[in-house]
Amino acid sequence: MTKTKLFALMGASTIGLLMTANAVNAQQSGNLSFLIDNGPQSVAVAEAWVAAYTEKNPDATIDIEVRPGGGEGDNIVKTRLATGAMSDVFFYNSGSLFQAINPVQNLLPLTNEPFQANVQDSFKSVVSAGGEVYGAPFAPAMGGGIFYNKPIYEELGLEIPKTWDEFMANNEKIKAAGKTAVIQTYGDTWSSQLFVLADFYNVLTEVPDFAEKYTAGEAKFATTPAALRGFEKLQETHDAGFFNADFGAATYPDGLRMVATGEGAHYPMLTFGIGAIAETVPDHIQDVGFFAQPGDSAETNGLTTWMPDSIYVAKSTANPDLAKDFVAFVASPEGCDVRNEAVGATGPYMIAGCELPADVPPAVADMLPYFQEGGHNGPALEFLSPIKGPALEQITVEVGSGIRPAAEGAALYDEDVRKQAQQLGLAGW
Amino acid sequence: MTASAVATLKTQRRPLYPGWFYAPAAVVYSVLFLAPTFASLYFSLTRWTLFDATFIGFDNFAQFFREPFLIQGLVNTVIYAVITSGLKVVIGMLLAVMLTSQIMARGYLRSVIFFPVLVSTIGVGMTFTVLMHPTMGMINQTLAMIGIKGPGWLVDPKLALFSVALVDVWKGVGLATVIYIAGLVAIPKDYYEAARIDGATKLQNFFYVTLPLSRPATATVITLSFIGGLRTFDLIWAMTKGGPGFASDTVASVIYKQYQAGFYGLSTAGNVVLFILIAVLVVPLTMVLNRKQGHE
């Protein structure tokens, strides 16, 4: 309470330091603060953008501030927005987490900015609230699926699985060969959610209106067999003994290293991991491939996609013109080139005119067909519904560790979801 | 002090200072302590988004007690507090007896036992997380050398809470020892002489002289470590974040997770519950401890 007031005072005094902004299109001057998360990728990209932008606009300065990721980061972003102490420009999730930061009250609308003409509508829909668009893509689109180790697949003569049964059969062969079939890394609890989250394309093929009914409180994970499958798949892989021995303590960087170097064959993950592999084990980037999490039918095989995170302008900014100009730069083909240069290509861009370099890593090349003509993909649930229960990662750790059966885990998650829906003030809960 | 004694004190007492002299302290007290306390009581009855608060009565408390992990969290909290304070009493007492005896380098050994108290809890937590890694940790690798397959200290849901409790004891036992040393040193030598004349053995010395006469120290150690155990958070968060799953969640970590998820009203309600829990357990405990002390 008192802390809140203190921050509000600090925010007010910052606004007092008003700066003059030049007319649009001219060279920009002034100072911006730019809040990003502390992932090595985000830092590298942000530094490259700032360097490129300030080279073009020598009178402008941009200070990068760094925050932790995950729940701690959510906390910081929400608190700073609520107290009016947010940096001018910041990076944060799109979709359901974006809805939770009260965009209409806290963010500057970017609907009529010229650069929005080049941004894909599917992205705009996940950074919109109350009829206004608030964000611009910070990164390429991602897929949620399974990284696999190519040398192991070649050595054992395995095919890319199109159905869950084929995937499990591959796992059996890998295990029989004395190798770790599936890598899990519960030292970073968030990574345990992938089997459930990345199964959502398969849910949509069977229950196309699941997201609407779920948001309205009519469809539940525990009582919708297609939605329960994600939890069951997690339990099946655990019960079959496919996991690495230290799955309870291993971390996300461990997982990426293991799938790249062949210590394990499969690692369910979001494709943003490609950038981290390129950075930490560059010698093995050619050894990592990617496929969508298989469902029950080979015909409908498709990828669950994640919209990129977004860059936003806080309503409390003292320098809106400069902030908008910087965002426009980030969302331009030039910004994409700077990004490709800094961290490499990790997926298809949501901005018209942004090109991928010819020599993308194999895992990126594996992902592209799902986005092209004839490929199937569908958005993850968090882009179709504002509700995501915060305890999912603990529940999936339990299911994946054999502490709690899949059905009970799904029922527990439904409880968690109810709490979030009430907090958001949705009707029907 | 009886009621009549209090009354006489009150009538005799005149203000020592003029009224304005109290004003600064009163302002600090009400702004920093009183206002937040009452604000938190109010917000615990609302659905609060930091932007606005909707009054919802006791729904938060109902929700908090419906949390499937909360009961587990409550039980874990009490288990944790009992284990850590119990072990600190026993080990602290034994260490204090050793460190008050005539041994070599006594001053050095005393400072060594106190050293973990001074180290940052988060640092200790991170260090032990590495040491307790199931396959690459030093503890299990040492066990493997003598042919024992070490357990998953922090990843086995049955063990995680106890592993954290043991680290807590390692870190906190130094303080208990120091309190005991002060208590033991203060026992007059006459008692031991009297006991010797009566022909008491060394063990009898300990059980009939040292132990009863160090009761004030025991009361202090139990109270401090029990309250510390009940509200423990930093070590658990650094080592397991309440995991695996919810296996080592305590009330404090459950509250923090609600806060992290943006359920501000709910987590405030949780804090009110924790406050009441500590009061309900600790007030009778200190009353019992102090009453016994009065009998001596």
Image (cartoon, coloured by chain):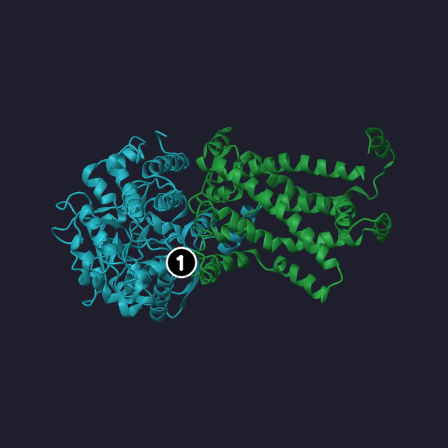
Quadrant assignment for the N terminus of chain A: top right
Name the one closer to the observer, A124 or A389: A389
Q: Amino acid at mark 1?
A: Ile
Name the one closer to the observer, B57 or A214: A214
* In the rendered image, the vertical position of residue A119 relative to residue B9, given as above or below: below
The image shows residue B212 at horizontal and vertical percentages of 76, 44
Residue at x 21%, y 40% (from the top left corner): A204
- Chain B colour? green
Residue A266 appears in the rendering: yes
Residue at x 31%, y 67% (from the top left corner): A281
Residue at x 52%, y 41% (from the top left corner): B76
The image shows residue B250 at horizontal and vertical percentages of 52, 42
Left or right of B245 on screen, residue A217: left
The residue at which mark 1 appears reads as: A36
The image shows residue B290 at horizontal and vertical percentages of 74, 38
Left or right of B26 on screen, residue A68: left
- Chain A colour? cyan
Residue A24 appears in the rendering: no
Which of the 4 quarters of the picture holds residue A429?
Answer: top left
Tag 1, which secondary structure? strand
Q: Label 1 lies in what chain?
A: A
Tally of numbered discs: 1
Name the one closer to the observer, A341 or A83: A341
Name the one closer to the observer, B244 or B67: B244
* In the rendered image, the vertical position of residue B279 relative to residue A269, given as above or below: above
The image shows residue A395 at horizontal and vertical percentages of 38, 42
Which of the 4 quarters of the picture holds residue A399?
Answer: top left
Q: Callout 1: few (<14), some (14-19), or many (20+) C-alpha neighbours within 10 Å?
A: many
